[in-house]
Amino acid sequence: MNLKESANPLESGKKVKPMRTVDVHAEHKYPVIIGPGALSKIPVALDRHDYERALIVHPESVTSIAKTVGQILQDLEIEVSYLIHPDGEAGKTVDVLSTAWDAAGAAHIGRRDVIVGVGGGATTDLAGFVAATWLRGVSVLQVPTTLLGMVDAAVGGKTGINTSYGKNLAGAFHSPIGVVADTDTLATLPDADFNAGMGEVIKCGFIKDPTILDVVEHAGPIKKGDPEVIDLVEKAVRVKANIVGFDLKESGIREVLNYGHTLAHVIEKLEDYKIRHGEAVAIGIVYAAHVAEEMGFCGPQWREQQKSILVKQGLPVSWKTDNFDTLFEVMTSDKKVRSSQVRMVLTCRSSQTNVHTIEPEILRRAALAMGVISA
Ligand SMILES: NC(=O)c1ccc[n+]([C@@H]2O[C@H](COP(=O)([O-])OP(=O)(O)OC[C@H]3O[C@@H](n4cnc5c(N)ncnc54)[C@H](O)[C@@H]3O)[C@@H](O)[C@H]2O)c1
Ligand SMILES: [Zn+2]
């Protein structure tokens, strides 16, 4: 895995805008282009590909961004069709997938054409899976418009939809030809969605890049228009790109990206997915810190440090449920749990991660210490 970064200042009127590119070395190399005005770099992301047609998949909330993308493609003499999908998780269903296949058929999308996902993680997951399955695989260009999409969902090649048995159960690994993360598109994103994305950004700080934590500690709470956002997106993308470059299909190293996700998945399920993913991850990070403490790996200082950064960003750090048995049952029903053994990513200081099998008694004691359950 090699990671190449380059500063590509884009001339825009009088102002030179900071544009960054992080190359991901997956089954093929692709760029993640980050910065204000990055949409104008779509032709660079398409590179030498000579596409004739494109199907742009997007939710209604980003229609004007999708139209801008469409215009850029038309200027390249690409024939453009659009598919508006139901918002959020309602877009990640087999019925919507079927509608999208029909749209690809109606648009005559062939092996040498491209599907373009414009939207949050739900959109990039759906668009990626349509591309992975249509004609056994066509190109996908991802244009994430949420912070979570930019730093997480659109990078790494995991695509999929939900089934009645749970989230993301049907999917495929299908790397994009490029990711264009235009930070200007965040302007219309609700603050709460931006903040939830910061949960994943801060997670990257804990598992790999402490400079992310420095930024939040000194300039936080980070708001979507802040100049630090571009840097933070780049840093978080670099963390993910580095990890998936080593472990494309989630056989080992990639597990560290699940830091904070053990309890997060339980919370999401028990809250019927009404809580935002990044918020659940923030709570899950504090729980992982308690588990690390119960295991004797670290003292309360590291836990408090993590908690204070999350609190500074305005992320939730506590949650309560009725009893441990329900919590444990949901935890062990997770698709990644093997033979009822809960494996968790733990940190004992920034960038020091280890994966451990955790005994139920430790899980219970940590839940008690954090106030997730009562004695
Ligand atoms: N494939 C992966 O590796 C991966 C990783 C993390 C998360 N995910 C998936 O990502 C999804 C969550 O992503 P998300 O938080 O981006 O949710 P989302 O896609 O549902 O977007 C959140 C909301 O913001 C709206 N929106 C998007 N961009 C906007 C903009 N610029 N302005 C105004 N509104 C905008 C959307 O319409 C939606 O209502 C989940 O389905 C999760 O499973 C996938
Ligand atoms: Zn996550």
Image: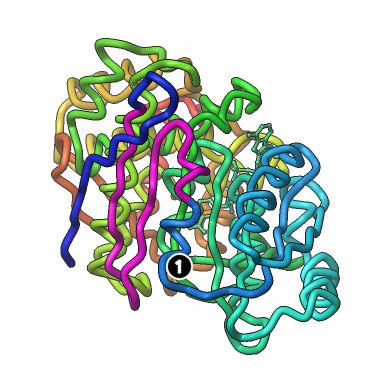
Kind of residue at badge 1: Ile
Q: Which of 343/2 is in front?
A: 2
Rendered location of residue 212, percent (x, y)? 25, 29
* Mark 1 neighbour density, 10 Å: few (under 14) some (14–19) many (20 or more): many
The stretch drawn in magenta includes residue 248: no
Side of 6 where 249 appears, left or right: right
Q: Which residue is mark 1?
A: 177
The response on whether ligand 1 sits within 8 Å of label 1 is no
Q: Magenta part of the protein: which range?
A: 17-41
Residue drawn where x is 25% and y is 46% of the image: 346
Residue 236: x and y in percent read 32, 41
State the SS at label 1: loop
**Quadrant in which the N terminus is drawn:** bottom left
* Residue that appears at 18% across and 32% down: 210
Query: Where residue 235 appears, x then y in whole percent?
Result: 27, 38
Up-down: is 62 above or below 41?
above
Write the residue at 26% across / 66% down: 245
In this view, the residue in front, 323 or 19, is: 19
Given residues 298 and 204, the one toward you in this image is 204
Seen as rendered, the residue at the extreme bottom is 136
Name the side, left or right, on which 100 lies relative to 367: right
Task: Please tell me which residue is depicted at 60% across the width and 33% down the height of the picture.
Answer: 321
Q: Is residue 366 visible?
A: no
